[in-house]
């Protein structure tokens, strides 16, 4: 695919407003957009430029429904263990924000199959990398994909609950044993606005020269 032309979109604006969009319209997404966001994924850094990835694009209603069913079952289990009330929160604002996130999660679980497109990035493990790095080449690609989607006005949500049922998903979609399901990402036009998610300030997460050393 030829390189997409540069646009006016500011990359920092895209980064700032790329967040989990769990309420998606069922409206169709142009095939060109899907190709473009996967193109962006394939520009990502990866170990030895082996490009250890495949991107499975699901639009078939039956397969989407089956993926949605698995997600809803795993979400129900997760929800029985975790909710806004069970979390240690330091402020009322934080509690409200968590409640909104869980409500959005409930919505996604009930409507997963309604996303017009579901993308499943799969990664191969690299022997050349060890530990956390061996399977991590896929995640820069996932982030590129989600940023490119945001730049095109498409919402995404990186979900991983299907990993708990990887064998079921493999069987459903014919995914071979060496291809690891990194995420299952519903893609579509969002019902709400993009906005910015809450994050710690840079100073709180940055050390200089030595672990724990801060600079004003
Ligand atoms: C490794 C990983 C796994 C995640 N799994 C899920 C998931 O299964 N379901 C979900 O709704 N969101 C999932 N998320 C999205 C996070 O909940 C979300 O990025 C985080 O709460 C920050 O919210 P924001 O993106 O709206 O700022 C996952 C994110 C990451 C990085």
Image: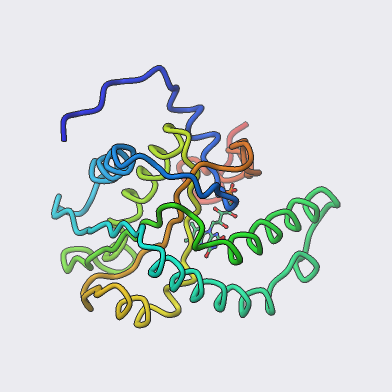
Determine whether 47 is above or below 29 in the image. Answer: below
- Where residue 77 appears, as percent x and y from the top left, is 61, 80
- Where residue 54 appears, as percent x and y from the top left, is 23, 59
Residue name at image x 31 percent, y 56 percent: 57
Determine whether 106 is above or below 79 in the image. Answer: above
Residue name at image x 41 percent, y 62 percent: 184
Residue name at image x 52 percent, y 62 percent: 112
Left or right: residue 155 compared with residue 30:
right
Quadrant position of residue 118? bottom left
Looking at the image, which is closer to me, 81 or 4? 4
- Where residue 147 appears, as percent x and y from the top left, is 42, 39
Left or right: residue 116 compared with residue 5:
right
Quadrant position of residue 132? bottom left
Image quarter of the C terminus: top right
Looking at the image, which is closer to me, 16 or 68? 68
Image quarter of the N terminus: top left
Left or right: residue 136 compared with residue 152:
left
Determine whether 129 is above or below 36 in the image. Answer: below
- Where residue 107 appears, as percent x and y from the top left, is 64, 60
Quadrant position of residue 198? top right
Q: Quadrant of ligand 1?
A: bottom right
Question: Looking at the image, which residue sits at the far top?
Answer: 8
């Amino acid at each position: 695919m030829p390189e997409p032309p540069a646009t006016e979109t500011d990359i920092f604006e895209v980064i700032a407003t790329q967040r989990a969009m769990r309420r998606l319209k069922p409206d169709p997404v142009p095939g060109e957009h899907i190709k473009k966001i996967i193109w962006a994924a394939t520009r990502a850094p990866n170990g030895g430029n082996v490009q250890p990835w495949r991107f499975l694009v699901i639009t078939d209603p039956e397969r989407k429904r089956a993926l949605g069913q698995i997600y809803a079952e795993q979400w129900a289990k997760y929800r029985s263990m975790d909710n806004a009330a069970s979390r240690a929160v330091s402020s009322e604002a934080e509690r409200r924000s968590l409640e909104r996130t869980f409500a959005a999660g409930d919505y996604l679980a009930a409507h997963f199959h309604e996303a017009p497109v579901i993308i499943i990035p799969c990664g191969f493990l690299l022997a050349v990398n060890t530990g956390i790095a061996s399977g991590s080449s896929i995640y820069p690609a996932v982030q590129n994909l989600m940023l490119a989607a945001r730049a095109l006005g498409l919402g995404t949500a990186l979900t991983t609950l299907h990993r708990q049922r990887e064998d079921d998903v493999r069987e459903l979609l014919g995914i071979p044993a060496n291809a690891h399901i990194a995420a299952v990402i519903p893609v579509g036009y969002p019902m709400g606005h993009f906005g910015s998610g809450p994050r710690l300030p840079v100073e709180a997460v940055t050390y200089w020269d030595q672990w724990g050393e801060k600079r004003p």
